[in-house]
Structure formats: structure tokens, C-alpha cells
Amino acid sequence: MAIYKLLLPKMGESVSEATLTKWLKTVGDTVQEDDAVVEIATDKVDSDVPSPVEGTVKELLFEEGDVVQVGDAIALIEIAGEEEEASAEKEEEPASEVAFDEEPQAVIPGIEQLTQPHTEETVTPIEPIQKTSDSRFYSPLVKSIAEQEGVRPEELERIPGSGAEGRVTKHDILAYLSAKGAVGTTPVVEEVKSDVRAVGSEGRTGVPPARFVGDSGEDEIIEMDRMRRLIADHMVHSIHTSPHVFSVVEADVTDLVHWRNKVKNDFKKREGENITFTPLIIEAITKALKDFPMINVSVDGYNIIKRKHINIGMAAALPSGNLIVPVIKDADQLSLVGLSKAVNDLAGRARANQLKPDDTQGGTFTFTNIGAFGNIFGMPIINQPQAAILAVGTITKKPAVLETEHGDVIAIRHKMYLTMSYDHRVIDGALGGSFIRKVADYLENWDKERII
């Protein structure tokens, strides 16, 4: 019998690690080809890892809750065949072990292959990874954050890692930077069991949150779930990174509302799904981004990255109460029908927890519809590394003064607030205000005779 090493597969651009949330197979279980072996979670999306081979689970190399790097062996599967042939095949053709991507799995420098010395079928044991300045592994994401924030190599060495084999995760370095910014000096970072450092009751970061129970002793302490902790960490990082500025406009969307009411039934019969206001607003955003391309940017140190593609992130609320942002790629290239189908598809798969890792990556601008909850307007937090996020409130009927050829009149109109938060490092008030006004103009000047 031979041993097949199941690797944590590549899960898309910028994803370098994942948390093993639940083993679906145990030692001794039989697995068929494409059977899911373990559920994983990244800072982008939840997914699972299937087995590309048929065999029996020999050993699980990590515990639930462990953070594992892409390319690490996570389980050993006993398969039929000669040991040497199976081992050579996997070394020469690493792509066969990749479940999410057909590209060959790159070898990550500094990581030795995991082995089990007590199992005769496995390869010869090797020395464990040494935690020295020359061999300590840092993911590309951690290195990028360190470079952007000016963290020196020797400073990086002092950060305790909460990942597998003591590796520094994204949350470790972000917590370190947050603590450093709070006290103004290099802090002493203490190890904690969780890889997320919370904001304390006095606004300091890098310390565990205070557990306060009221005088009655009946208050309930609810620990954040994994996704909520990731969201919290991401939001704190965004506020720490970008100086937020806000602009608000009110749009008269009466013509838009009447047009949608006119076409929605025929659209449902023809396409088999609803047309909501979301794709209509996203279309207006993409047009405005073409008019103002310096909104569709990111910041890298003192460089501005002007994005070629217009990829719109669409904030979606999950049944659990958490938030996820699937992305419509090249939204400006889609027709209104295409946008509507993309919106419905991503929203449906988000609610069903069926998004793929690539579905939440590559966004260049984010849109959120807070009007779905009856809110009139809000001030959202920028979704890093983007430079702006736009929110729309609920559409309400209001009396408004209209100018006509016979004089001013008061009429009932459909009104909606649009608010935008943007990074003042690269977007000034004139640019941000002009952009959001342009979005409103596209919505207000909707073609009432448009045919789709």
C-alpha cells in the first residue's frame, strides 16, 4: 500500500492560509474520489477540501482550529499501489493534489514536507522546522503587510505566532501593528490562545477584551464566532489604515421606480428571476467609475494603484447575521440582464454558504444596500484595500418642489439617500463629491422607455 499526502490546496489569489474548522472524516474512514475530507475557513469564504483519490484515512495531521498554510499536508490517505510510485507521482505532479485550481502547486520556501516517523509506509522522517531568523516562514501576505507598515525583519522575529508551527498569521501582525499604533512605541506582544486581539474597553488594542458582567450577574457573555472575529479585525484594520471622509446626496429616483415596476413582471416571466434595484444601482456606479477612474484605486505606500478592471463588491448579509462581500468581476462589461443574473446568483449562493474562494476576491469598489433593512442612510467602513464604498438607503415617498413651465409645484416623489466613505489619502472632497453626484445623476436620468 502507498501513502497519499492530501495537501491544503491553492484557494485563489492572496489566500495563503486557512483554518481547519471541522474534520468530515476520521482515521480509518474510507474515502471515495471527490469526497469532502475537511471543512476549512479563510478570511474570504468557507469551503471544503475533497480527496482526489480513493483510499482509507491513515492519519489526520492537524487538529480542528489549527491554521494551516497552503501547500501543507493535512492528512495521509492509504491507497492501493506501490509506495515509491505513489510518492514519485505526487512529487512530479503536484497539480493532481490541487482541488480548487489546476495550476501546479508551488513549493513554499522554508517548509519541509510533513512525515510520520511511526508509519512504515511514509517517507523518511526529517528534522523539524527551526524557529530561527533564517528559516522562520512568513506568508506573502504577512510579508506584504510588514513591508507596507515598515516592520523591520528583526521586529518581525519578535512577534509570537499563533499559526501552525508558531507561524505569524495576518491577525498576529495586524494586532501587533494596532498595539504599536496605540502606544507609539514597539510593544511587547503577549501570546494569547486566539489569533485575534480585540479592542479593550479603553480603546487599546493588542490586549484581551475585558469580561464585564453587570451587577445583576445575569448578563450573558457571547464569544464571537470565527467569521465575526475576522470581520471585527478587518474593520479595525480599515479604520487604522484609511482616514475616512463621507459625502451624502439625495437622489430623485421616481422614474427609476416606475420603470422597474413596469418591466419586473415581464422580466420574471422571461428570465425566471426577479430584477431588483441592486443591479440598476450597480450599473450607475460602473458608469460613474468610468467617468472618475481615480475612485477605482488602491493605495500601496506612497503609490496609487489605478485599477484596470471594475470589479464591484456587493455586501450581503448572511442568515447568521454576519457579512460577506462577493464580487461581480468586470461589472462594466455586463448588460443589465447580466448584472441582474450575477447579483441574484451571488446573493443566493452567499445565503446558501456555497460561494467559492474566488467569488470574494479582486473587488475594486464596494456597494452596500442598507435600505433593505429600512435604513435611510449610513456611513460604511471602507473594504480594504479599496479606496471607497457606497451605500444606498431605503426609497421613500416625499413631497418635493418641482419646477415646471407653469411654475413651481409640489409633487410626491421617490427619494433615496446615497452615502460614500472614501480614503482621504487619495480621494479629496471635490473628487468624492463629484463621483457620488454622478451616480445620482445616472439614477435620476433613467430612461423610462428603456427596453431590456
Image (cartoon, helix red, strand yellow):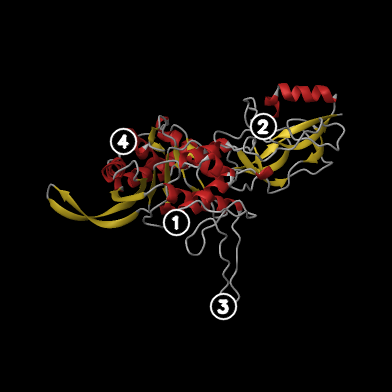
> How far apart in space, not on screen, are marks 4 and 2 (Cα)?
40 Å
Q: Amino acid at mark 2?
A: Ala
Going from the N terminus, do you reach mark 3 or mark 4 first?
3
Residue 187 percent location from the top left of the image: 52, 53
Identify the amino acid type marked 4.
Phe
Gap between marks 1 and 3 measured at Cα: 34 Å
What residue did someone put label 4 on?
Answer: 292
Tag 3 secondary structure? loop
Q: Which residue is mark 2?
A: 99
Q: Earlier in the sequence, mark 4 or mark 2?
A: 2
Left or right for 320, reference 71: left
Q: Is residue 263 above or below residue 1?
A: below
Quadrant assignment, res 32: top right
> Which mark's residue is nearer the viewer, 4 or 1?
4
Quadrant where the image shows the C terminus = top left
Q: Position of residue 223 (x, y in %)?
A: 61, 60
What distance separates the C-alpha of mark 3 from that of mark 4?
55 Å
